[in-house]
Image (spheres, rainbow, N blue to C red):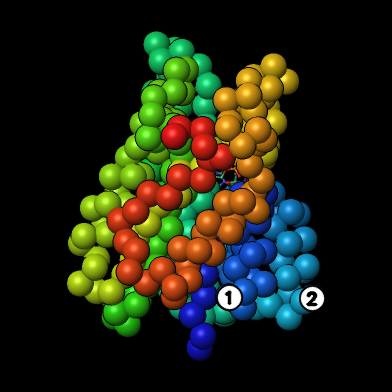
Amino acid sequence: MKPSALITGASRGIGRAIARTLAQEGWPVCINYLERRDAAEELARELSNSGCRVLPYRADVADRNAVEAMVQAAAETIGPVELLVNNAGISQYGLFQEITDAEWNRILAVNLSGPRNTIQAALPHMIGEKRGNIINISSIWGLRGASCEAAYSSTKAAVIGLTRSLALELAPSNIRVNCIAPGCIETDMVRVLSAETRRMLVEQTPLGRLGTPEDIANAVLFLASKNTAFLTGQVLTADGGFIV
Ligand code: NDP
């Protein structure tokens, strides 16, 4: 069976755009989601109506068993996962002193253990075939500090460390591991911010606008392409010049 792409957190925002873009390029796609079944199934119908092979699948990326079952289901229905996009993520805003154990543990479980779980589940096939491509979605806040977002920023920095380490460890198996660090992208994650904060973010972005989910999907497409076969261990910053 033709290989497939698994995109975590693909019911909304950046992940949804990634799934749509990869499907339009001919990839069978597994649309992972957590709460928004309706949105995931609506996207699945849209893609399926245009001839794509699609599997919408509910799994909490923090749950190792659920992730293993999802990767297995993808292999059986749309093809073994050879392109893995670790996009699912949660953010949290607040003073460091006030973060509870539950909040700290959850953000680590989703943003860091999530990619660990998906990568470990997908690797046996990739290593067996000596072929695979892993793209992790970090953030510009993983490259620089973010006041009142210490937990989020820490997980996104850790994702960069994971990317670089696995790029080295998996290169002998011909598996590429890269990372994208988006700037401020117009999704629900940013829509919760005040109008004033969003205006400031636009002002701080040299290209003068927030990014779109499609801007990040196009960066994923670039790293997914055979034309970038010699790129591994890289952090591609897609931020309109925010941290130049
Ligand atoms: P959204 O909040 O818009 O969407 C988050 C997506 O992740 C949803 O599809 C949600 O599923 C899914 N999700 C959340 N938790 C889990 C979980 N435990 N298991 C499976 N799926 C889960 O986020 P964005 O699209 O804005 O962000 C996507 C990624 O990009 C994140 O990793 C984020 O940190 C990163 N990023 C975003 C930036 C931005 O400005 N927006 C900037 C830099 C990085 P459901 O809806 O079904 O619950």
Left or right of 217, for residue 226: left
- Find residue 154 and name its label: none
Q: Is residue 99 visible?
A: yes
Depth order, front residue of 116/244: 244
Depth order, front residue of 40/148: 148
Categorize mark 2 by other alpha carbons within 10 Å: few (<14), some (14-19), many (20+).
Answer: few
Q: Give the image quarter of residue 47.
A: bottom right
Q: Earlier in the sequence, mark 1 or mark 2?
A: 1
Residue at the spot 50% in from the left edge and 16% down from the top edge: 94
Left or right of 161, for residue 59: right
Residue at the spot 73% in from the left edge and 62% down from the top edge: 43
The answer to whether 214 is drawn above or below residue 197 in the figure is below
Position of residue 174 measured from the top left corner of the image (x, y, whole percent): 28, 74
Disc 1 secondary structure class: loop
Q: Pointer 1: what residue?
A: 27
Q: CA distance from mark 1 to mark 2?
A: 14 Å
Q: Is residue 102 visible?
A: no
- Find residue 49 and name its label: 2
Mark 2 beta carbon near ligand 1 (under 8 Å):
no
Q: Are marks 1 and 2 in contact (CB under 8 Å)?
A: no
Give the mark toward the camera: 1 or 2: 1
Categorize mark 1 by other alpha carbons within 10 Å: few (<14), some (14-19), many (20+).
Answer: many
Residue at the spot 67% in from the left edge and 40% down from the top edge: 187
Three-letter residue code for mark 2: Asn
Position of residue 211 measured from the top left corner of the image (x, y, whole percent): 63, 42
Disc 2 secondary structure class: helix
